[in-house]
Image: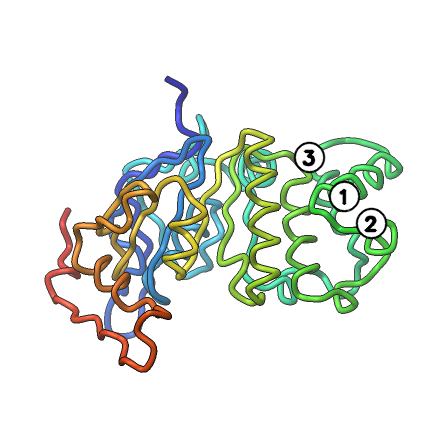
């Protein structure tokens, strides 16, 4: 059996305030191999902070602790800043939610993709340009030469998200973390972006941690689903078994999904149990 690309045990992310310490992530554990794993939950459940902790990008004064936080054989919590710069891109890459805030507005698309590649490969500029064009073709951009020389503000939201995926995959990482990569896109473009991710991850034999609030989307796209509530993972199950979820929070989320078959009826309201927030160490 191959070792997992990502191992998380007892991960906690906390932020001090004037009155108390707020725990955004509270002792979670999971692994990701060469598969598509969905991390799903409401806004504020700790999904994005989990992704940032994995790549070592929790902003101060945030504090990250864990029993184990491993990217392959690299201990994220004990790695130096220099080592983490090597790991990001080569071992793991992260696609953030909105390309408008992730892409540099004063650099062309091609320059940014080439920069992410040259950060890990000592190659001439001409080869980096070829790699950038190759990646733009890989994410199904029809006119890669034009987009290569364009600036981010000249792109649509869907095209910008494809550029972000191309940039993060240029160094050929083992694991991709996609944080709400389709949340700002319409339904048609969503499906196009998901098809690109599915094709690239499958063809390259990568692992994918897909962070989303859309339970139905994650269930259709991923192999396994981790359901997060209040900073904890309350249920882990195969995506094919999602309709047979056991935890009342997961069942409540499923019941609240709109259905064309009950048009005009009010959506069920999720009844929350304070016991779901209890810290089970």
Evaluate if marks 2 and 3 touch, with contact meaning CB atoms under 8 Å apart. no
Q: Which residue is mark 3?
A: 120
Q: Secondary structure at mark 2?
A: helix
Mark 1 crowd level (few <14, some 14–19, many ≥20, 10 Å Cα) = some
Residue under the point 34% across and 77% down: 263
- Answer left or right for 207 relative to 188: left
Q: Is residue 19 above or below residue 205?
A: below
Percent coordinates x, y for residue 232 in the rendering: 25, 54
Q: Are marks 2 and 1 in contact (CB under 8 Å)?
A: yes
Tell me the mark number nearer the camera, choosing from 1 and 3: 1
- The label nearer to you, 2 versus 3, is 2
Question: Between marks 2 and 1, how big is the CA–CA gap?
Answer: 6 Å
Q: Are marks 1 and 3 in contact (CB under 8 Å)?
A: no
Going 33% across and 67% down the picture, which residue do you hit? 257
207 relative position to 107: left or right:
left
* Residue 44 on image: x %, y %: 35, 66
Viewer can see residue 223: yes
Q: Who comes first in sequence, dot 2 or dot 3? A: 3
Mark 2 to mark 3 CA distance (whole Å): 23 Å
Q: Earlier in the sequence, mark 1 or mark 3?
A: 3
Q: Secondary structure at mark 1?
A: helix
The spot of residue 268 in percent (x, y) is 23, 74
The tag earlier along the polypeptide, 2 or 1, is 1
- Residue 32 position by quadrant: top left
**Which circle marks residue 144 in the picture?**
2
Q: Position of residue 6 (x, y in %)?
A: 41, 34
Scheme of image coloration = rainbow
Q: Residue 137, labelled with which disc?
A: 1
74, above or below 280, in the image? above
């Amino acid at each position: 059996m191959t070792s997992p690309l990502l191992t998380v045990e007892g991960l906690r992310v906390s932020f001090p305030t004037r009155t108390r310490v707020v725990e955004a992530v509270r002792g979670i554990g999971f692994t990701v191999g060469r598969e598509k794993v969905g991390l799903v939950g409401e806004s504020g459940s700790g999904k994005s902070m989990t992704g940032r902790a994995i790549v070592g990008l929790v902003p101060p004064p945030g504090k990250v602790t864990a029993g184990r936080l491993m990217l392959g054989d690299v201990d994220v919590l004990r790695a130096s800043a220099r080592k983490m710069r090597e790991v990001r891109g080569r071992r793991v890459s992260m696609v953030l939610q909105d390309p408008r805030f992730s892409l540099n507005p004063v650099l062309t698309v091609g320059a940014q993709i080439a920069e992410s590649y040259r950060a890990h490969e000592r190659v001439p500029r001409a080869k980096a340009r070829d790699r950038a064009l190759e990646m733009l073709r890989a994410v199904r951009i029809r006119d890669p030469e034009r987009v290569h020389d364009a600036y981010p503000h000249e792109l649509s939201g869907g095209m910008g998200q494809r550029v972000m995926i191309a940039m993060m995959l240029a160094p050929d990482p083992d694991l991709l973390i996609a944080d709400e990569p389709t949340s700002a896109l319409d339904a048609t473009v969503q499906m196009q972006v998901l098809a690109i991710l599915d094709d690239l991850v499958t063809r390259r034999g990568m692992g994918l941690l897909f962070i989303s609030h859309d339970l139905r989307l994650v269930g259709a796209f991923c192999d396994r689903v981790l359901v997060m509530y209040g900073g904890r993972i309350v249920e882990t199950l195969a995506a094919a078994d999602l309709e047979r979820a056991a935890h009342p929070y997961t069942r409540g989320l499923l019941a609240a999904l709109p259905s064309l078959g009950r048009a005009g009826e009010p959506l069920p309201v999720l009844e929350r149990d304070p016991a779901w927030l209890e810290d089970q160490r």
